[in-house]
Structure formats: structure tokens, C-alpha cells
Amino acid sequence: MKDVKITACAKALPERIVTNDHLTQIMDTSDEWIRTRTGIRQRHLSTGENTSDLASKVATKLLRQAGLAASELDLLVVATMSPDSQTPSVSNLVQAQIGAVNAVCFDLSAACSGFVYALTAARSLMLTLQKKTALVIGAEVLSKLLDWQDRSTAVLFGDGAGGVLLEASQDAHFLAQTLTSFGESAQAIVAGANPAGKFPQTVLQHSPFTMDGRKVYHFATHQVPQLIAATAEEAGIELAQIDWFLLHQANRRIIEQVAKRLDLPLAKFPMNIQTVGNTAAASEGILLADCLADGLIKPGQTVMMCGYGGGLSVGCCLVKF
């Protein structure tokens, strides 16, 4: 076993679609205001499905694509910032729902960088422990974390899940991975904060999602291009040789700026933010599923995946399909 490869990819989105016009009925905003600032036209929002439900749908699809039994899974990693509960983990709930009785399970919390962080962690464990199969799923029901009267944050997010099946390979597929964290800027994105407990405390309090938009925009447009360039350099590949750049779908303007700073054509940066919004840890998994389903990514091509956001953090991995 020399490396691992992505052998299946799937997504799951809630059925309910909420357009920008729908949001104008509950907050002071407009379709034009949202579109011009973010590129988002609509998003999918849960009507009762929790994070584990969406993740389980993805897991079932991945197993079906690969013709694998759930009992054949060795590892199950879920990246999420909106778990069903603090414990049990989403991954354990998925394990129970699909019957993956032999899988080692854990969740990973790195917000919008979560999918790339989880990919890197799962690959490392597979190589170290000689595991043959793993599911890596990014899953979010962010709607339960939002203040639906705060137009600066509520209009940005959607619910969904996306994931991949990793299998052992004798060929190199993960060409380089780079992870960075910036804890000094941690308060720029906060969700579900819990105050320090007092005895006797009878009421649990959880804060809604808050974000310093200007700070996050500056962070993303500066740190993301640097890390993408560093990851390509580590792999010994010129940026121009990379076929596709799958970035976390946070904001169309950010993606445009990253492409500009890297002096790359925007056509190499597929986007689905207009239809699903920002789905945090599920973002790159959903986008990858869309690109593969559309035939955009072909065997032999190289894809740079990059997640960035809460922590603050950035993660990049360069993968050969």
C-alpha cells in the first residue's frame, strides 16, 4: 500500500430550497443585495433532517457506488461544525445507521476547512494503520446555528453533506497536503459558544453564528493563494499545470480574488455557491460530487482542493484522479 485514492464521491441535500426572495419575507434584504455580495441565489435548508441523517445518506450512496458492504469499512471520519450533539459523535451515529460495525469512527471540527483536514487525517491513518477503506464526509445543518434575523450571516449558509470513499492504492494520488491554523484570529468566526459554567447552573446557553466579514475576506484572499502556491511547490508542480481548483464555496468574490492573485483563469475554479450557498465542511465534497457527475474532472487530471474559514484555518490538498 503506497497511497490512497478517491474511488467514489456523493452528496446529499435537503429537499427544501430557499431562494433569496424567500428570505426577503423574514428579514430586511433583497435578492440583488445577496447576489451581488456573495453570488448566492438559493440554498437547501433542512426541515427536520439532522447532520447525521445527511451524512448517512452520503455514506449509503458511496457504498452503493463502490459495491461495498458497510461491514467492509475500516474508518469513518465526519467533518462538521454542526453535530447532532457534543456526544455521541456524528460518525458514530452514521456507523449505527449504515451498519459499519468494523469502522473506527470520529468527528473532526475545523469548520470550513474540515473536509480537507479530514481527508488528510484519514489518509494518514490509513497509511499508518494499513487500513484499506475509509469514508470521509463533510456534513452540516448550519441552519440550526443561525440567527435568522441577522442578514449579515443568515443569507450565506445552506445545509448539506458531501463525501468520498478512500481505498488503498499502489499509485501516488495525494501529491501534497498543507494545513495551517491562525488561532490569534479565532474570534472572527464563532458559533455555538458556551459560557463557562457556574454552580448551580440550570440553563445552557449557546450563541448563534457570528462573523467579522471584513476580517475573514482579507484573511481568505491573502492566506488562501499563499497556501495553494505552497502546496503546488511542495508537489513540484506549476500552478498552470493543475487542471482544477475546488475552493470552499464561501463567497464568489473571494474565489475571484484568489484566481486573480494566482494569475489563473477563473474558468479553472468551478462554483456551485449560487445553488447551495456556504455549506462549511460539506462544501468541497458537494462541489467535487457535482464536478464528477458533470464529467468535468477526468481520470489523470490534478485537482487542488482548498478549505478555509473558522479557526481561522486553511487546508489544501493536491490530488491526482
Image (spheres, rainbow, N blue to C red):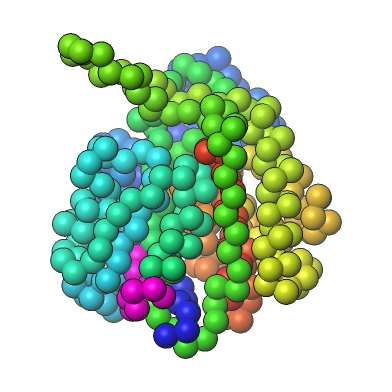
Q: Is residue 131 magenta?
A: yes
Q: Residue at x 21, y 51 (%)?
A: 93
> Where does the image place residue 105, in percent across and percent down from the top left?
27, 58
Residue 31 seen by the camera: no
Q: Residue at x 79, y 55 (%)?
A: 262
What span is in magenta?
126-135
Q: Nearer the viewer, residue 154 or 213?
A: 213
Figure disc tally: 0
> Where does the image place residue 320, in percent across and percent down from the top left?
59, 76
Q: Is residue 240 left or right of residue 131?
A: right
Q: Is residue 226 left or right of residue 91?
A: right
Residue 91 seen by the camera: yes
> Where does the image place residue 194, in percent across and percent down from the top left?
35, 23
- In which quadrant will I find the N terminus? bottom left
Q: Residue at x 21, y 44 (%)?
A: 88
Q: Residue at x 63, y 63 (%)?
A: 304
